[in-house]
């Protein structure tokens, strides 16, 4: 059990717990994208590069975009500020 | 309690995140938070699955040189299953978000209880 | 107990406090709380409800959530403590299935990347199902969000009316997109075509291509892409790719079950034209996924794409 | 391999191709594609049924070039073939019966997507019935989830349908999450995903007592996951809204088929993966029995208070699902036969009731309330007769299909002494009385006289497909009610070759 792994795993739990506590959807989405990015790093540690690529493209990329577009469509984040990627 | 809790720290993390995600999907009232809870739930299940395939000291099963002995490579099955699972998870996320969008455009709220109330009022 | 500074700041941020004080007139993605409050469409809270009553209820509700959460976690943690050791090399999953996948995959399926060989040859039925999950999801999103018009020009679903997108003019973002978009596109195509040789495959490559297309549209507007990429283009690409996928797999399943030779050459492992059906299948999946990701984006942001559809 | 053995696989692939094709066709064309496909598959599966009954055995069909522990496969025995015949048959009739309302309730430009969704739903249900691999089951469970939610929300004008879809989807996702976790725990202690080798390994584990706790948790996860998805009583809060707010054909499909496909999967997992004796000793059958009995009573009880015909039918579905789980929970072979019979009986009856409810609504100004529906049976006699047949069947009058379930359930209860006998008999009697208490007033209300003349000039729909569907449903109901012997015989052989 090395320190980097423990740090990453702790971060996963912290992300999950903080999303459960926050009230603002936007913050929740940002933390969720962080969660996905850490997950991609963990896939690399677990020797699964396929999953790392997929998680980075899908979990942090496309899912994040979908969340932001949703928030923008329903007017919770506005105008030009809703930048993607 | 069994003896392997401290060695199975990947699985332990995964089930803690699963519990949080499950509760968010089940009991949180905000639809966006529910969707994120669903994402956490699925991601942690995949972490659980993938950690089953890992064997310390071995590398990912991309066979570059001619040594095709199973002594060198980790188990490819969980990775394949997780790939399938991630696709399912992103599809469901898109569907849930589309539902959220439609509901918000109709009722101007993200709270599910409020939507139920408004939709019942609309019907009668 | 005193929390470390960064943790305290993080927790405060999560709880809804602004970490950095900002002037009132500032706006942007980080200040949605404020925008939400100013949103005229949002209905005011119904005043008739008794306050202390609802407070008690919500406290009970939170307590219930915590109890559910802890029960699930504790049960599963106990389960985990009984499971085989992580990383051990004599676990139950290290059995004949794993050995054959690793040792004989190269001669049986011909893919250097064992994972690709496994999901597209040994367990291809799952993967066929998976691509149809994506297909049915995009159908559902079309049902929910595509803004179809009646003959008189009004929308079938009135609330789907969206404001026309303003042309983006962020110069920094544009420069970044100019560099990132081609790189992403080429990398995505590489990942799709090399799915059987290295990490990646149709799905991840398709997602990267889709993300690049979204980036392009965000930076330069969608008029040019809309001319080429209409709804019917999308429909026919998806149709062609999925039908090809289904037919190829039907052939493979049929010959497999009836003990016939499939007649598909496996090629020399490591070459780009190898591994039998895996390359065409990856291309099909990549096409579907790339178009689907872009379709998701257009449907979510403006309820349709191409020629005002 | 005989040609007929390819048909189950061909059915799945035909539906896949058909579903993809429907999305590029015009609505009318896609309707015909879907209907012809359903009839074709019914025919194909009927020949498979004859074949398996003739041989009396099951066979596995490789999905690919690799045998059991390595490749995917499907497995077809008499029980699977019976379900595989019943599902497309009921689907055809339900679509025919609700066709007019599909074209009214769904957005005109998106009607072809309705048939896409229906075809993919059939893919997933057939795959769930035939599958011999747990992970395949998970993937198709997800297709099933999305498709069934899409069926609800396709009724685009109703905001209530959208909210109901959301609740349905969330509960379904919780269920499939638990189901997936169960599969993964099983995988990590057995190392297999296909049912046969997994089951062999689980028997060893049970014998040696290793991993006892994870196995118990897994049984719990599977049961709760499938109970959430098939609306067993304490988890059934989403069902009335979801099933009542969809268009008539969707309601029929959801009540009659979708719920059942999950139960068939659960039965397969119990028999083929975990082993029926281990299930019995784990006590999960007792819990399922109690919940099933609770559903029988409470579902009917809620239905008693309803003044809305579609919600009444939906609550009645909750009660009928309770019968299935009570049968499974008895833990005997007779109980399991009763459960399988009930699956077929309910699949043949409830879609008909939902179709007739749409018929009543169209002669009552589109209203579902009882005060507007008074006399609807006189205005539309065909629907009235069909509803009466369905109601009598649900109550359990002899000659109608529902009677067979009650007969088998009583038989199964009587063969099993102890607390289950008394609770079961009491619940059965109570549930029958309650069923009669809400169905008979509904029938008399439908044939009652109106004091006003509000709907005197409405004419019933002149639609041959509706006529054909309703007549077929009535005939099917009588057939199941009077000559159930061959069906129970097939189920009996099917169950004995299942494990």
Image: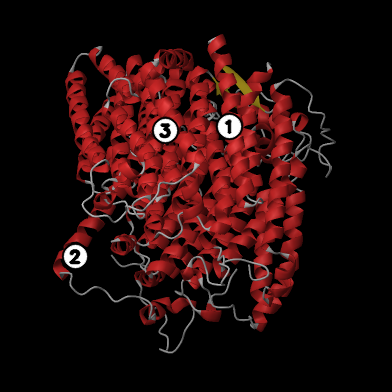
Q: CA distance from mark 3 to mark 2?
A: 40 Å
Q: Is residue D342 left or right of residue D467?
A: left
In the displayed structure, D216 sits above or below B6; it is above
Residue C9 vs residue C123, the one in the foreground: C123
Give coordinates of residue D163: x percent, y percent. Answer: 38, 57
Secondary structure of the residue carrying numbered label 2: helix
Subunit ID for the residue under disc 2: C
Query: Which dot marks residue D138?
Result: none
Quadrant where the image shows the N terminus of chain D: top right
Q: Which residue is mark 1?
A: D39
Q: Is residue C45 left or right of residue D181?
A: left
Q: CA distance from mark 1 to mark 3?
A: 20 Å
Subunit ID for the residue under disc 3: D
Give coordinates of residue B65: x percent, y percent. Answer: 78, 38
Q: Write the residue at 66% across / 69% down.
A: C215
Secondary structure of the residue carrying numbered label 1: helix
Give the quarter of the image for residue D381. top left
Give coordinates of residue D4: x percent, y percent. Answer: 65, 19
CB atoms of marks 1 and 2 within 8 Å: no
Q: Is residue D256 left or right of residue D24?
A: left
Which label lies toward us, 3 or 2? 3
Query: Which dot marks residue D260?
Result: 3
């Amino acid at each position: 059990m090395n320190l980097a792994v423990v740090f990453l795993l702790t971060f996963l739990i912290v992300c999950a717990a903080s999303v459960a506590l926050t009230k603002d959807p936007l913050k929740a989405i940002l933390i969720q994208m962080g969660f996905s990015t850490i997950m991609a790093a963990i896939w690399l540690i677990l020797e699964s590069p396929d999953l790392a690529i997929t998680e980075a493209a899908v979990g942090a990329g496309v899912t994040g975009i979908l969340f932001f577009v949703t928030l923008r469509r329903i007017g919770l984040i506005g105008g030009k500020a809703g930048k993607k990627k | 309690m069994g003896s392997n809790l401290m060695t199975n720290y990947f699985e332990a993390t995964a089930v803690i995140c699963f519990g949080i995600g499950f509760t968010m999907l089940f009991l949180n009232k905000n639809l966006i938070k529910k969707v994120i809870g669903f994402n956490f739930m699925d991601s942690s299940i995949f972490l659980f699955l993938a950690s089953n395939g890992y064997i310390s000291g071995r590398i990912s099963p991309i066979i570059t040189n001619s040594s095709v002995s199973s002594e060198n490579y980790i188990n490819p099955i969980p990775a394949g299953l997780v790939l399938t699972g991630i696709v399912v998870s992103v599809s469901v996320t898109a569907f849930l978000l589309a539902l959220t969008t439609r509901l918000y455009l109709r009722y101007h709220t993200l709270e599910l209880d409020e939507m139920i109330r408004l939709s019942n009022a609309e019907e009668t | 107990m005193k929390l470390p500074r960064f943790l305290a700041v993080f927790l405060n941020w999560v709880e809804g406090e602004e970490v950095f004080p900002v002037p009132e007139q500032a706006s942007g993605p980080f200040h949605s709380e404020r925008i939400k409050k100013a949103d005229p469409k949002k209905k005011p809270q119904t005043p008739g409800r008794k306050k202390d009553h609802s407070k008690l209820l919500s406290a009970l509700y939170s307590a219930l959530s915590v109890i559910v959460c802890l029960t699930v976690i504790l049960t599963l943690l106990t389960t985990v403590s009984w499971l085989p050791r992580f990383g051990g090399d004599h676990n139950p999953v290290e059995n004949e299935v794993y050995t054959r996948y690793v040792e004989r995959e190269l001669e049986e399926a011909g893919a250097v990347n064992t994972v690709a060989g496994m999901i597209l040859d040994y367990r291809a039925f799952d993967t066929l199902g998976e691509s149809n999950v994506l297909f049915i999801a995009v159908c559902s999103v079309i049902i929910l969000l595509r803004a179809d018009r009646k003959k008189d020009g009004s929308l079938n679903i009135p609330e789907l009316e969206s404001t026309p997108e303003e042309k983006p003019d962020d110069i920094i973002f544009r420069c970044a997109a100019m560099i990132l978009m081609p790189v992403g596109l080429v990398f995505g195509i590489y990942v799709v075509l090399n799915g059987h040789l290295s990490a990646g495959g149709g799905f991840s490559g398709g997602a990267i291509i889709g993300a690049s297309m979204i980036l392009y549209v965000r930076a330069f507007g969608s008029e040019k892409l809309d001319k080429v990429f209409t709804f019917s283009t999308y429909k026919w690409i998806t149709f062609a790719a999925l039908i090809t996928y289904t037919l190829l797999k039907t052939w493979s399943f049929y010959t497999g079950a009836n003990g016939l030779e499939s007649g598909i050459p496996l090629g020399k492992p490591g070459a780009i034209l190898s591994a039998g059906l895996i390359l065409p299948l990856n291309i099909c999946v990549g096409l579907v996924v790339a178009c689907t990701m872009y379709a998701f984006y257009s449907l979510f942001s403006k309820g349709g794409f191409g020629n005002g559809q | 391999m005989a040609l007929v053995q390819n048909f189950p696989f061909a059915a799945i692939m035909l539906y896949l191709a058909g579903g993809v094709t429907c999305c590029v066709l015009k609505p009318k064309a896609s309707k015909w594609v879907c209907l012809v496909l359903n009839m074709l598959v019914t025919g194909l599966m009927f020949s498979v049924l004859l074949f398996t009954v003739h041989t009396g055995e099951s066979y596995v069909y490789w999905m690919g070039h690799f045998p059991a522990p390595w490749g995917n496969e499907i497995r077809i025995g008499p029980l699977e073939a019976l379900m595989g015949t019943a599902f497309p048959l009921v689907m055809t009739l339900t679509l025919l019966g609700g066709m007019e309302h599909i074209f009214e309730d769904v957005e005109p430009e998106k009607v072809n997507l309705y048939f896409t969704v229906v075809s993919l739903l059939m893919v997933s249900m057939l795959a769930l019935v035939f599958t011999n691999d747990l992970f395949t089951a998970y993937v198709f469970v997800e297709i099933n989830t999305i498709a069934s939610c899409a069926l609800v929300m396709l009724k685009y004008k109703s905001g209530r349908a959208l909210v109901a879809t959301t609740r349905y989807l969330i509960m379904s996702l919780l269920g499939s999450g638990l189901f997936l976790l169960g599969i993964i725990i099983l995988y990590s202690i057995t190392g297999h995903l296909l049912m046969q080798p997994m089951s062999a390994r689980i028997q060893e584990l049970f014998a040696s007592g290793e991993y006892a706790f994870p196995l118990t948790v897994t049984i719990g996860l599977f049961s709760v996951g499938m109970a959430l998805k098939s609306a067993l009583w304490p988890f059934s809060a989403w069902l009335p809204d979801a099933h009542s707010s969809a268009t008539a054909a969707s309601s029929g499909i959801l009540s009659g088929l979708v719920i059942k496909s999950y139960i068939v999967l659960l039965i397969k997992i119990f028999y083929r993966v975990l082993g029926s004796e281990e299930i019995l000793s784990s006590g999960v059958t007792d819990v399922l029995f109690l919940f099933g009995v609770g559903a029988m009573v409470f579902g009917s009880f809620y239905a008693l208070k309803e003044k809305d015909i579609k919600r009444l039918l939906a609550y009645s579905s909750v009660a009928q699902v309770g019968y299935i789980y009570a049968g499974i929970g008895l833990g005997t072979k007779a109980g399991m036969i009763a459960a399988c019979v009930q699956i077929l009986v309910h699949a043949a009856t409830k879609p008909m009731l939902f179709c007739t409810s749409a018929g009543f609504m169209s002669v009552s100004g589109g209203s579902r309330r009882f005060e507007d529906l008074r006399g609807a049976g006189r205005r539309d006699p065909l629907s009235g007769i069909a509803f009466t047949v369905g109601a009598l069947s649900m109550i359990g009058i002899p000659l109608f299909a529902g009677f067979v379930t009650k007969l088998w359930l009583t038989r199964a209860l009587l063969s099993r002494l102890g607390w289950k006998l008394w609770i079961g008999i009491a619940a059965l009697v109570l549930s029958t009385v309650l069923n009669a208490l809400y169905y008979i007033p509904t029938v008399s209300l439908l044939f009652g006289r109106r004091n006003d003349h509000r709907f005197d000039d409405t004419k019933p729909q002149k639609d041959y497909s509706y006529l054909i569907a309703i007549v077929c449903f009535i005939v099917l109901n009588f057939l199941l009610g009077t000559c159930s012997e061959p069906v129970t015989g097939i189920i009996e052989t099917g169950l004995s070759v299942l494990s």
